[in-house]
Amino acid sequence: MAVGNVDFPGMNKVSGIRLGTSNAGIKQTERDDILVVEMTEGTTCAGVFTQNAFCAAPVHIAKDHLQQNPRWLLVNSGNANAGTGKQGMSDATTSCASLASIVGGTESQVLPFSTGVIGENLPIEKIAAALPKAVNFLQEHGWSKAAHAIMTTDTFAKGASLIINIDGHPVTVTGISKGAGMIQPNMATMLGFVATDAKINQTLLQKCLAEAVDQSFNRITVDGDTSTNDACILMASGCSSAAEITENSGNYLSFAKAVMDVCKRLAELIVRDGEGATKLMRIRVEQAANDAEAVMVGKTIAHSPLVKTAFFASDPNWGRILAAIGRSGIEQMALDKVETYLDDVCIVKHGERADSYTEAKGQHVMNQKEILVRVVLGRGQATQEVLTCDLSYDYVRINAEYRT
Amino acid sequence: MAVGNVDFPGMNKVSGIRLGTSNAGIKQTERDDILVVEMTEGTTCAGVFTQNAFCAAPVHIAKDHLQQNPRWLLVNSGNANAGTGKQGMSDATTSCASLASIVGGTESQVLPFSTGVIGENLPIEKIAAALPKAVNFLQEHGWSKAAHAIMTTDTFAKGASLIINIDGHPVTVTGISKGAGMIQPNMATMLGFVATDAKINQTLLQKCLAEAVDQSFNRITVDGDTSTNDACILMASGCSSAAEITENSGNYLSFAKAVMDVCKRLAELIVRDGEGATKLMRIRVEQAANDAEAVMVGKTIAHSPLVKTAFFASDPNWGRILAAIGRSGIEQMALDKVETYLDDVCIVKHGERADSYTEAKGQHVMNQKEILVRVVLGRGQATQEVLTCDLSYDYVRINAEYRT
């Protein structure tokens, strides 16, 4: 039940980055569930990871290996290798070693990622058996197959790609993501892999990724549940003919915007694939005292089951939005300054129903598939957006049937 | 779809407290929707109210009138008089004046309470027309009718009553509550009215109520949405033959426990009537560093849509519970100390699946209607309980169809 246009886009290959997939039969036998990504020598690599205290074994290992000039990513779907204790750590390391032995690298040059069921041990023999085929298929045009291989409850593959111009030289930014439930990323979404052929040092690359993730994956929520396995990786192969991108340069701003745009699209696609979603809500909080306050109000609205079910029913139930704003935790809010809009229709002015509001106007907006909820707090200059989806029967069905 | 035994109990009358109901046709014509409570002269009265910044007009007025020795409560269901601005304040005051003129009191001696749809003006003429009948019916045995008159989406009336012995004299504590959705009380639930014939001064009564509410209504959640109209009132008529209850006395402890027990039962009944609920989950967090931390972990689990849908499906999906604990915001949690139990079945030990755990054992507990989720943090001595219910198709149906 994807919301809006979610066609998989044409993906520009990234010179120096090759991808290969295969089927290990971890949870299903029909779709590839293993992805190997090879980064050419000299690639810099940045990563952000879940802040869930019970982060999965592969998250621990990937954080560690990230500091050791990694050359490969090893991703599996169908099993999260989370809540698996010492055995999980050992299994993640063993899988890294399996790949290393095939490609001629070292265990510490492999970053592992897992997504799927929590609490079951990783089938390391199945994975080892599937690796040679994935390595054999490594190619720069492997993005679409890669996007499919990392899916779990996703109903479509998610990709974004663009080419920018740096001093007359093309620089590509291409990425994929997965996720549909257990989505309130705190540092990163379930899984996002973004690559570029730009030349850029690791420190600056990490800064660029952190900023992009903060405004993209960290601004979406489906159900408020932060996963144990969230990770987002940004790889820079340096294969572009463009000069190295340096801090505080105009080129950095262009590059950072491209990374941000790709991350925002990948994050938005996750909300459009939100479990059971029938509507996309963009909640923009304006005139907040600061960014944190704007995000707090936005997320309180986005997490309210009452607001989410009202949107599912196309019911312009503005009282529920107002109640969510009121419980969001802002101290000493000047209610008479609060305004709320559904797209251009003002529903609340001076903290109460706007005189100009009619049920017909509200209903007209509510019938749309994509709705902007705009909250004006009248407290300052900060604006932040949070993206979410509605709460439908199908969310309950999917999560009552599926073992995360 | 009430969970467990929710039969309306025998209610002990409280000497000095009379209740009368009538039908004003605010939203429905078949059931009484107006409740008037009369407190005999000399009754002390304590109250706690929602902390939602957009609290409703009657909440503002009731807070104000509470300081002026109130003698009457005026409650209506079907309309919350919230988000109604200046008109709402005027309407609430007018209704108080209408009742005062009938009973021969002053406007400021009436506490108003409203529950129902947000954002529509209160039909003050309908209410005024229905008041004489409610006043005419005032009687000490009016508790059952009162409990029915304050219902909105509730599927059953909620009451609790007990008699304790103070130095050989009986003291009664009797109360009613309402609520099923928009339930994560912050100070009090939707509406709770508790009365006693004890003699106790207002300051001590307020302290007693605040403590009781903190451990009862403030420890339940259905959907995490704090209402704009929450209020809980404790009335002490002083008509009992028992001596006045004074601070730091054994009698105070007995009395406070009775008030606590009544409030806990009234709060639990709200969860048992949670919108669409099929299961009751009692989430007990033990060995937390402090009470706030225990509540934080309990509420994170209780609010997780993934946990709630797993319980609806009777799926022992402990990974979702672990993920919720992990994202609850505790700094530097020692994962290897964390244990989790479903009733007596240990599912997580040392931060991972317990060796003794089997799916069959977990499934056995999950098939029950009432389940204790016990989380042991290994960080300190604090224990707190949070009550919640599961998330079912019917929650979505009810809230997609009902205009709060």
Image (tube, coloured by chain):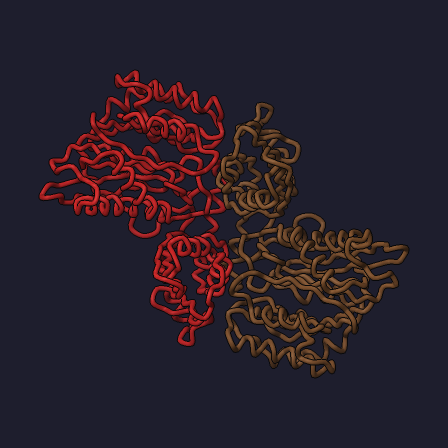
Chain colours: A red, B brown
Outermost residue, left direction?
A: A168
Question: Is there any visible trace of residue B366 in the rendered image?
Answer: no
| Residue drawn at point x = 60 percent, y = 34 percent | B376
| Residue drawn at point x = 67 percent, y = 69 percent | B31
Q: Nearer the viewer, residue A230 or A7?
A: A230
Question: Is there any visible trace of residue B69 in the rendered image?
Answer: yes
Q: Is A91 drawn above or below residue B365 in the view shown? A: above
Locate residue A303, reporting x and y percent.
Answer: 46, 52
The image quarter in which residue A200 lies: top left
Left or right: B213 with respect to A332? right
Locate residue A358, reporting x and y percent.
Answer: 42, 73
Left or right: A393 with respect to B388? left
Q: Is A357 drawn above or below residue A55 in the view shown? A: below
Q: Nearer the viewer, residue A30 or B162?
A: B162
Locate residue B184, reporting x and y percent.
Answer: 57, 54
Q: Nearer the viewer, residue B30 or A294?
A: A294
| Figure disc tally | 0
